Amino acid sequence: MLRKEVNDLLTQTDAGTPMGDMFRQYWIPALLASELPKDDCPPVRVKLLGERMIAFRDSKGRYGLMDEFCAHRGVSLWFARNEDGGLRCPYHGWKYDYTGQCVDVPSEPDESGFREKIKLRAYPLVKIGDVLWTHMGDKDNRPPLPTWEFATVPAEQTYTSKRWQECNWLQAMEGGIDSSHVSFLHSGSLKTDPLFKGARGNQYNQNDKKPVFEVVESDGGLFIGARRMAEEGHYYWRITPWVMPSFTMVPPRGDHPVHGHFWIPIDGENCWAWSFDYHPTRALTAEERQAMIDGYGVHNQYVPGTFRPRQNKDNDYLMDREAQKRGESYSGIWGIAMQDASLQESMGPIVDRTKENLVSTDNGIIMARHRLRKAAEALRNKGVEPPGRTPEHQMVRSAARVLPPDQPFKDAMKDDLRVRPGVKQTSV
Amino acid sequence: MASVGPFIDVNHPTLLHGCARAATAAEAKYRVQYPNSRTRSSRIFALDPGAAEAMYAITEDPWNGAHFLTVSNARPVDPAVTAASGLPIAHPDGSTADLLAELEGADVVVLLATRGDNEGAAEVIAREAFGRNIMCAGFALASGQQDTQVDRVVNSMRRFARVLVVARDNDYIPAMLSALRA
């Protein structure tokens, strides 16, 4: 249960809100690099943290992200011409460069200096991996560039997708740290999904549906350990890292690529679910990459030409009750990503947490909310930088391992939970 | 295409509330407004003086019937020879409490510890809770402690708790108890 005022604090991320201020402390994924594939390509509308912006790539390959609307009469610059190093509004020809600076007002004399007084709010847009990242906060307090492993391994080892999720970011993210639902909601997919099936760890998941949890605070967020019974009194551990504010990873299975998510607010009632898969030490196989493109694993299928999932609330997520009865899908929804999203969206755009009844096994979620709230309040009241901004906080991995019963995961798996370049993930 | 009769196709509901599109803020106002749960019965045990100090800081807050109890550390508890009725526990006002009576009707047991030297008491409480199918959660309060000390606390509770949390700050206790409607 969460009081309404705390729920409001955690879920609202528009400019000027405590959580909005906090998200603006980080580099966050803004677009897939493939959305701006070449110089002078069409601009793209972007909405993040309640701000409507336009993204473009100019004639010299420089990325820009700025206020969507022309300073003159408020026209959307999606209609602009991307030419000669800037976006030109088609209405009266005002032109802006990648920094948001107005560089041409045709109706005014060049010598007047008028154009220099016009500047749209703009944010940096930096390509790292398959992703264009932005920092929407104070430029004098910009954190180091992101160092997440999925974005920094060679291109052939990684794949990233994004999808529109029609609910608040927090309830989506809470699914990412809720390890206990896997044995139910995803039980069918563990047997059939090409990016999950075949791992020895899956058997432990299937055989023990009552995991025991250990939640340990880390410098950047949390490690949430789920422990299930393995052979000879040993424990099968699956460790989910959460790094503030909204980065989660799924513990790996066998030699399958490792996957995870960013949960980025679009506005109060919508978010981007970013999903990545990578292998730390080898290229993804053609089959793996095709499976990701086809919507398996943590990825999804799309309404053609959009980032909206093919299964969505307008078609009841293509619920298949017969597949449910046949045991192919526990919930009747196809695909791991949409199994999660369908349920999270069904809660409503912002779930009313005053009505929920959490239990002890939800302590990962409780702790994450607690840390988010504390960090947002410390930032607002004392100017304290929140965790998760620095490379050492970002260099984490998920891991899975079988351990003797007397070994705490936080010690026995300490190295497994850190990025070790050239060393493959620890998995079962 | 699923059909339940000559005219009704469940995949094409007649009204908005009959499909997933009803997951809107506007439709949320039509949700049933009656309470969906009854008051829980929570028992919080501080296993050592440090845990008791952290617990006493919040016992006066408005809780939903949670009972706060301390375990006496006057002498070590040997779980092999200590029956539930013999465990020395007390209410915050110092009056003696009875473990069996406290666990009657309890929904959740929370063990708080800052040290690992009261493992015996934890076992007696957890054993009794297990026998009654009561969920047992353990909280290692790591505020200001070194890793080795925290490990000792965690190891002392691992055998008994279905959930184990290592919290750096004591203010997680009220946050967690509020979330659990204690």
Image (cartoon, rainbow, N blue to C red):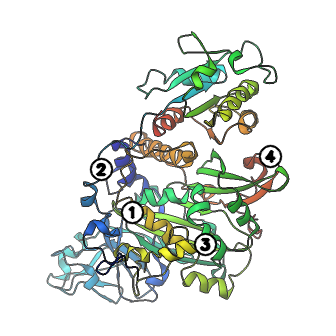
Image vertical order of residue A109 relative to residue A12, above or below:
below
Image vertical order of residue B22 relative to residue B50, above or below:
below
Quadrant where the image shows the C terminus of chain A: bottom right
Q: Which mark is residue A189?
A: 3
Quadrant where the image shows the N terminus of chain A: top left
Residue placed under numbered mark 4 in the picture: A407
Q: Which quarter of the figure has residue A181?
A: bottom right
Please tell me whether mark 4 sits on a helix, a strand or a loop. loop
Tell whether B174 sits left or right of A90.
Answer: right
Amino acid at the residue labelled 2: Val
Residue placed under numbered mark 2 in the picture: B32
Q: CA distance from mark 3 to mark 4?
A: 31 Å
Chain designation of label 1: A
Q: CA distance from mark 2 to mark 1?
A: 15 Å
Label 1 crowd bin: few (<14), some (14–19), many (20+), radius 10 Å: some
Chain designation of label 3: A
The extreme right residue here reads: A232
Residues tagged by mark 3 and mark 1 found on one chain of the structure: yes
Does residue A134 appear in the picture of this structure?
no
